[in-house]
Structure formats: C-alpha cells, structure tokens
Amino acid sequence: MTLDRSVLLFAGIMTLLSVVLTAFVSPYFIWLTVFIGANLIQSAFTGFCPAASVFRAFGIKKGCAFE
C-alpha cells in the first residue's frame, strides 16, 4: 500500500470513527470531524499532511501525491 492510499484510508477511518463517537458517546466529538475536514482542506492546498509524515517515518513507500 502506498503512502497516498494509507493517508486516504486513515482519513476515512478517522472520519467514520468520529461520526460513531459523536452519535454514541458525546456530541462534542463533532469537533474531531471538523479537525479532520480542515486538515484535508489544508493538505489539498499546501501538499503537507501530518499523517503522511508519520506514515513515511514508519517506512510506507511513497506515492505520487505526498512527497
């Protein structure tokens, strides 16, 4: 799995997790969803993604989106 797909998978899992936590634990978990969305927007404009940096440190091979 490439870095790009790993980041997309992680973002999807975290989004679904935050929705479940919002529904069943506390409505304040909506802020986790907001944070994930804001991070996706800033990475689209800047090309920098903190999750990609962490995955790269774990040795995930590069894709074409995050360098």
Image (cartoon, rainbow, N blue to C red):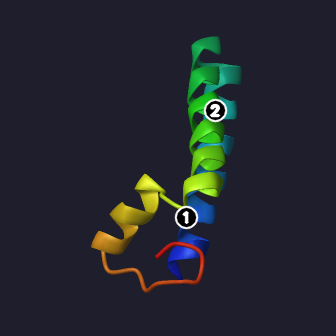
Q: Quadrant of residue 5?
A: bottom right
Question: In terms of image quadrants, where is residue 20?
Answer: top right
Query: Residue 28 at x, y = what percent?
Result: 58, 14
18 is higher (above) or lower (below) than 29: below
Res 54 label: none
Q: Which SS class for mark 2?
A: helix
Q: Is 27 placed above or below 35 here?
A: above
- Identify which residue is drawn at 40% across, 80% down: 60
Please give the residue where the numbered disc 2 appears in the rendered image: 33
Amino acid type for the residue under numbered disc 2: Thr
Point out residue 21 in the picture as x, y percentages from the top left corner: 61, 27
Q: Taking the image as drawn, is residue 17 in sight?
A: no
Residue found 47% across the figure and 84% down from its top: 62
Residue 50 vs 60, above or below: the answer is above
Q: Tell which of 23 and 46 is nearer to you.
A: 46
Q: Name the residue at the left extreme.
A: 57
Residue in the image at 56% along x and 43% along y: 39
Q: Earlier in the sequence, mark 1 or mark 2?
A: 1
Q: Are marks 1 and 2 in contact (CB under 8 Å)?
A: no
Q: Kindly identify the amino acid type of the residue bearing the numbered disc 1.
A: Val
Of 11 and 41, nearer the camera is: 41
Circle 2 Cα neighbour tier, 10 Å, few/some/many (<14 / 14–19 / ≥20): many
**Crowd band around label 1 with a 10 angstrom C-alpha radius: few (<14), some (14–19), many (20+):** some
Count the labels in the image.
Answer: 2
The correct choice, above or below, for 55 with respect to 40 in the image is below
| Residue behind mark 1 | 7
- Residue drawn 59% across the image and 46% down it: 42
Cα distance between the residues tagged 1 and 2: 16 Å
Callout 1 secondary element: helix
Residue 61 visible in the picture: yes
x and y percentages locating residue 56 in the rendered image = 36, 73
